[in-house]
Image (cartoon, rainbow, N blue to C red):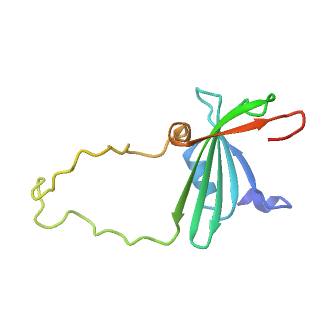
Amino acid sequence: MEADSNSQERIEVLTADAWNGTRACVKNLNRPITLIMHKHKKTYKDIVIERFNYEKNNRITTTIGVKSDFAKKRAKKKYFYTEKIENLNHQLKKKRGRPKEVKNNQNKKKQSSKVKKKRGRKRFRTVFNKGKRGYAKIDPYRKTV
């Protein structure tokens, strides 16, 4: 917000390292903005680009994963992308605590053995593993993608 107030034009593109705090700060600006992240750990070659757009009460996050030499020379390059739509209306909070008459796993329903979902926060390289694959023809000499 401070950098935005010190510049003449509104900031639309940010470059940062891949800290979750930086990402959360940009995400909660609630305006269209592009964040380019480059992690300062191995593998150094990955770049993740996130575009936050807003339509009515929805936040549309487009995430693109590319290698750092994406536009270096003329070739057909591979990239990965995902798109996520979040509803910005507040969800109702669940009732706190455990339900009555359920203590020490009593009356607990057996869970079926479906695909286990990974716990924890979304990692930096997730787009490379779970995203859709796309290809782009790059020609840096003619400045075309």
Compared across the picture, whether 63 is left or right of 145 comes to left
Q: Nearer the viewer, residue 33 or 79?
A: 79
Count the marks. Answer: 0
Residue 99 placement (x, y as % from top left): 18, 65
Residue 114 placement (x, y as % from top left): 28, 46
Q: Residue at point 77% right, 57% down?
A: 11
Is 83 rendered above or below residue 79? below
Compared across the picture, whether 107 is left or right of 10 comes to left
- State which quarter of the image contains the C terminus: top right
Q: Nearer the viewer, residue 13 or 73?
A: 73
Q: Residue at point 51% right, 37% down?
A: 129
Is 141 rendered above or below residue 110? above
Q: Residue 70 is drawn in which quadrant? A: top right
Q: Residue at point 11% right, 58% down?
A: 103
Q: Residue 133 is drawn in which quadrant? A: top right
Is 72 rendered above or below residue 50? above
Compared across the picture, whether 41 is left or right of 9 comes to left
Q: Residue at point 70% right, 57% down?
A: 33
Compared across the picture, whether 67 is left or right of 97 comes to right
- State which quarter of the image contains the N terminus: bottom right
Q: Nearer the viewer, residue 83 or 123?
A: 83
